Amino acid sequence: MTTAETPQHIAIIMDGNGRWAQSRGLPRVVGHRAGAAAIRPVLERAEQLGVKVLTLYSFSSENWNRPTAEVDALMALCCEKLAQERAGLIESGIRLRRIGSRTGLPAEVLRELDITEAATAGGRNITLALALNYGSRGEITDALRAIATRVAAGEITAAQVTEDLVSSSLYTSDLPDPDLLIRTGGQMRLSNYLLWQLSYAEILFSNTLWPDFSPDDLCAAVDDFAHRKRTFGGIATETSAQSIPVGSHCVEQGGLS
C-alpha cells in the first residue's frame, strides 16, 4: 500500500554477512548464503509496502580485493541465485536491473544477469536493482567521460552540461533517486555507494547484521522514514507525517519485530 510517506526507492548496504558467520564459528561464505536468503522476504515486504525500487549493494568494485576464494564463492552464489529465483521473479512481477560495471565480471555471471534482466523486463510491481561490481566514483567518472566525449564531438556545449544531464548519464538513469538508505551491520559510512543519488536521502544505520534483517525490520525503517521531516534545503513545516501512528506500516503488514 503506497502512501505519501512511503519511500519510493530504498537503497540498502547489506553489511554483516561475514561477521554473522564468524560469530557462529562458520566460514564467511556461509554468511553470504544466509545474506542471499534474506533478500527475498525483504523484497516481498518492500513490494507490499508500495516501494517501487529496492537497490541492494551486492558487490562493490573494492570487493575484488578480498581473498580469491571468497570472491569466487560470491560469483558462484550470484549465478546460482539468479537461476533459482528467475521464475519466481517473473511470476511476482519483479523486474531485475543491474547497475555497475560489466568489466571484470565473469562471463557466466554476465550471462545469468543478462538472461534474468531480459526475462523480467516486463515486471511492473517492483524493481530490484543489484549494484554489482559497483563503485560510485567509478560511475561518476564514466558519466563525465561520456559527457566529455559528447562535448568534444560537438554534440553538446559545455554550457549544456547540467545536473539532469549528469543524472541521465549514470548507471541509474532510469531509476528515481533513493528516498531512504539503510545500512545494516552497525557501520556508519557510505562506502562509495550511490554518492550522487543519495544527496537528499534519509539515512538509517541499523546494528542488525544483514542475515538477521527481517521484513519487520524493514517495516520499522519505513515507519521511521514516515516520521521524518524532509526539507530538501528549505524550512520544516507541519506535515501529515506527524499524525501517522507509530508502527502504522508494520501493523498493516503484520507487526513490529
Image (cartoon, rainbow, N blue to C red):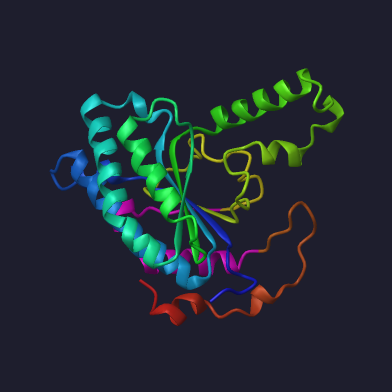
Rendered location of residue 29, percent (x, y) = 20, 40
Residue furthest to the left in view is: 25
Is residue 245 shown above or below 54? below
Rendered location of residue 31, percent (x, y) = 23, 46
Q: Is residue 213 visible?
A: no
Task: Name the foreground residue: 25 vs 118.
Answer: 118
Q: Is residue 78 visible?
A: yes
Q: Residue at x 28, y 50 (%)?
A: 83
109 left or right of 249 in image: left
Is residue 32 shown above or below 92? above
Which residues are drawn in magenta? 203-228
Residue furthest to the top in view is: 152
Rendered location of residue 146, percent (x, y) = 66, 26
Rendered location of residue 231, percent (x, y) = 73, 58
The image quadrant of residue 237 is bottom right
Q: Residue at x 21, y 28 (%)?
A: 69
